[in-house]
């Protein structure tokens, strides 16, 4: 593990490299607000040319501010469309700061990723179609919890992933580079020789050994190596540049420890060792060493350079082929569906329409639509302009969306000999989801069925203490009234939706009911009642998942899942984390 001063040294080196080559995309800066983060940002700003743009992305930014569009005031005066640049175009040649990047809207993240990839922003709105060249450095400020990360689409396009949480303000020394050094390095970068085949092979081999699967990472590492050479005033990439680039770019992305170098057998090593007489024969023996030996040494050098900067927790995987998944985690909990609303929530744009009591007129967008047509409509755009001529087709009304609260309804089979084990595992899953309910607006309900009927044991709640108290007394055993449980779940789901929530049904059973809706113990009628209940769930439009918890699934659960139009998962050994993953996947389909 590296010390705080070494982490800071790498961080300010990354700042200098971003100033040299904005094509590196930028960096994610994981650090809370404070003097350390401010010192790094100030150091980066000091390296930029005087007057370089420095923009900050406001929360909930809309397309009109992010991308640009029609300049209403200028359009009204000129009687024609006039382009107004957005933040992405304004940041050209400078830096764009994205606070709370872990909470970026998916649409905004996609726009940022596309602009970084293309080096231009496309404006296709307000009757305009423009392409503006822009190249900026994006700094994504990551202020989330341990399992929260910015969108993966952005992480792949940013060269550096910097973590400053363990750096104190005493370790944050000022950056030593100057704008003159950056300008000189940029000149050297234009004359830089392209990396040779050995360098490309070494970077790609290091990425493969570390479990870095994105092809963008090796490309960014090679660009970093070129910028490092330029910073030193050289025009050729050497081994030290490649080693440093691997440490800065590949190590933070590692998902597994590289295999330790193989140690040759002592007897074979002695047999392969050249005799003293052969060693003195001159250059003839030196030519026997193939190019693969030098390449292998370079590959080992890069891997050794990355080991000191590998993420914490990978040391335990120091085995051949050992790996650990570090893919972007799903957001905790189920956030509920995005529902269109008339006057509340996050604004998502406008649409043509007539304003009424349910939807309000968007005056600015209406004027933007009408402005380019004033000359054709006979209006006078000069100093003595007359009234603005607006037609019905120009009307634009506001559109909003609001993230609804979600309710996860567990329907648990508490019958049979395996009920106690299933219930214990289900309790763990319910408690896990409730613990995350404060991060995402989620409520949890529990319906258990055994004997002759189903029972709502836990009404929708966020209270972890209440859930633990109710679950502690949950018992199992008896017959399987599956149809009754499905009917109760459908009724509760419809009731929750009527309250503005998004119901998600998670049914845990082996799919073999033996009690019909009328209480009769006829398996054939019970199975038909269960299928009919599943079809009612589908007709009601409820999102559902069926988890087959039987030791040997026989297809009954899959048949029911198909009838309800839901997801199916076979989990003979129910685990809380696996159940949570099913819930997240279920919410992701909406």
Image (cartoon, rainbow, N blue to C red):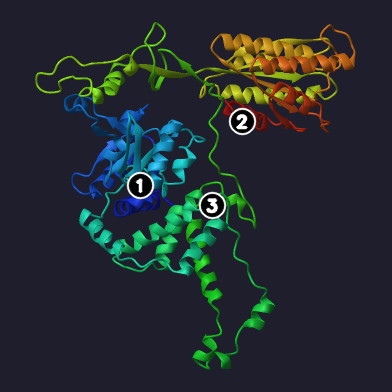
Which image quadrant: the C terminus?
A: top right
The label nearer to you, 3 versus 2, is 2
* Disc 3 and disc 1 in contact, CB within 8 angstroms: no
Whether label 1 touches label 2, CB < 8 Å: no
Would you call the spot at circle 1 few (<14 residues within 10 Å), some (14-19), or many (20 or more)? some
- In the rendered view, would you say 549 is above or below 113? above
Which disc is residue 585 wearing?
2
Q: Is residue 418 above or below residue 148?
A: above
Instruction: Examine the image and state in which quarter residue 293 appears.
Output: bottom right
Is 572 rendered above or below residue 530? Answer: below
Could you tell me which residue is drawn at 26 percent across and 46 percent down?
93
What is the x, y in percent for residue 68?
30, 33
Nearer the N terminus, badge 3 or badge 2?
3
Percent coordinates x, y for residue 282 in the rendering: 50, 92
Marks 1/2: CA–CA distance: 33 Å
> What residue is rendered at 35% in x and 41% in y?
139
Residue on which disc 1 sits: 119
Q: Please say whether residue 309 is visible from this viewpoint.
A: no
Residue at image point 18% right, 47% down? 50
Distance between the alpha carbons at the discs numbered 3 and 2: 24 Å
Instruction: Locate residue 49, reporting x and y percent.
Output: 21, 49
Name the secondary structure under disc 1. loop
Q: Nearer the viewer, residue 279 or 74?
A: 74
Q: Left of 52 or right of it: where is 160?
A: right
């Amino acid at each position: 593990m590296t010390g705080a001063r070494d982490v800071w040294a790498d961080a300010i080196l990354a700042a200098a490299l971003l100033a040299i080559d904005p094509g590196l995309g930028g960096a994610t800066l994981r650090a809370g607000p404070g003097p350390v983060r401010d010192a790094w940002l100030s150091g980066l700003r000091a390296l930029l040319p005087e007057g370089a743009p420095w923009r900050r992305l406001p929360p909930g930014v809309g397309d009109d501010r992010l991308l640009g569009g029609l300049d209403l005031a200028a359009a009204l005066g000129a009687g024609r469309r006039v382009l107004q640049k957005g933040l992405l175009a304004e940041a050209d040649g400078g830096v764009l700061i994205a606070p709370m990047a872990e909470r970026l809207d998916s649409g905004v993240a996609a726009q940022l990723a596309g602009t970084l990839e293309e080096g231009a922003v496309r404006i296709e709105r307000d009757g305009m179609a423009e392409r503006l060249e822009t190249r900026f450095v994006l700094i994504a400020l990551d202020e989330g919890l341990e399992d929260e990360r910015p969108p993966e689409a952005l992480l792949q396009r940013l060269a550096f992933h910097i973590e400053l949480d363990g750096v104190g303000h005493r370790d944050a020394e000022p950056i030593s580079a100057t704008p003159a050094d950056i300008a000189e390095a940029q000149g050297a970068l234009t004359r830089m020789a392209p990396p040779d085949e050995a360098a490309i092979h070494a970077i790609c081999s290091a990425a493969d050994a570390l479990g870095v699967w994105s092809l963008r990472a090796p490309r960014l590492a090679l660009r970093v190596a070129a910028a490092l050479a330029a910073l030193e005033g050289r025009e050729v990439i050497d081994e030290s540049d490649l080693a440093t680039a691997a440490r800065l770019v590949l190590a933070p992305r590692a998902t597994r420890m590289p295999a330790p170098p193989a140690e040759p057998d002592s007897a074979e090593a002695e047999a392969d060792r050249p005799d003293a007489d052969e060693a003195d024969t001159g250059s003839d023996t030196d030519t026997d060493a193939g190019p693969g030996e030098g390449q292998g040494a370079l590959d080992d050098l890069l891997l050794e350079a990355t080991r000191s900067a590998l993420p914490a927790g990978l040391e335990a995987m120091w085995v051949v082929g050992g790996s650990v998944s570090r893919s972007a985690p799903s957001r905790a909990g189920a956030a509920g569906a995005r529902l269109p609303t008339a006057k509340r929530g996050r604004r998502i744009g406008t649409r043509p329409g007539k304003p009424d009591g349910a939807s309000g007129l968007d005056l600015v967008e209406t004027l933007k639509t009408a402005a380019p047509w004033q000359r054709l409509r006979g209006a006078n755009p000069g100093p003595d302009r007359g009234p603005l001529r607006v037609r019905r087709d120009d009307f634009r009304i506001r559109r909003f969306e609001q993230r609804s609260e979600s309710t996860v309804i567990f329907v648990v089979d508490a019958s049979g000999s395996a009920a106690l084990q299933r219930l214990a595992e289900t309790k763990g899953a319910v408690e896990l989801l409730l613990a995350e309910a404060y991060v995402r607006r989620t409520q949890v309900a529990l319906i258990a069925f055994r004997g002759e009927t189903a029972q709502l044991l836990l009404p929708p709640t966020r209270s972890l203490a209440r859930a633990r108290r109710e679950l502690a007394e949950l018992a199992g055993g008896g017959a399987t009234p599956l149809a009754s449980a499905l009917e109760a779940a459908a009724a509760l789901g419809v009731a929750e939706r009527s309250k503005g929530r998004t119901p998600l049904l998670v049914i845990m059973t082996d799919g073999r009911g033996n009690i019909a809706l009328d209480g009769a113990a006829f398996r054939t009628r019970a199975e038909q009642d269960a299928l009919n209940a599943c079809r009612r769930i589908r007709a009601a439009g409820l999102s559902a998942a069926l988890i087959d918890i039987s030791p040997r699934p026989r297809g009954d659960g899959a048949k029911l899942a198909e009838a309800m139009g839901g997801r199916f998962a076979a989990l003979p050994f129910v685990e809380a984390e696996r159940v949570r993953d099913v819930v997240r996947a279920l919410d992701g389909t909406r």
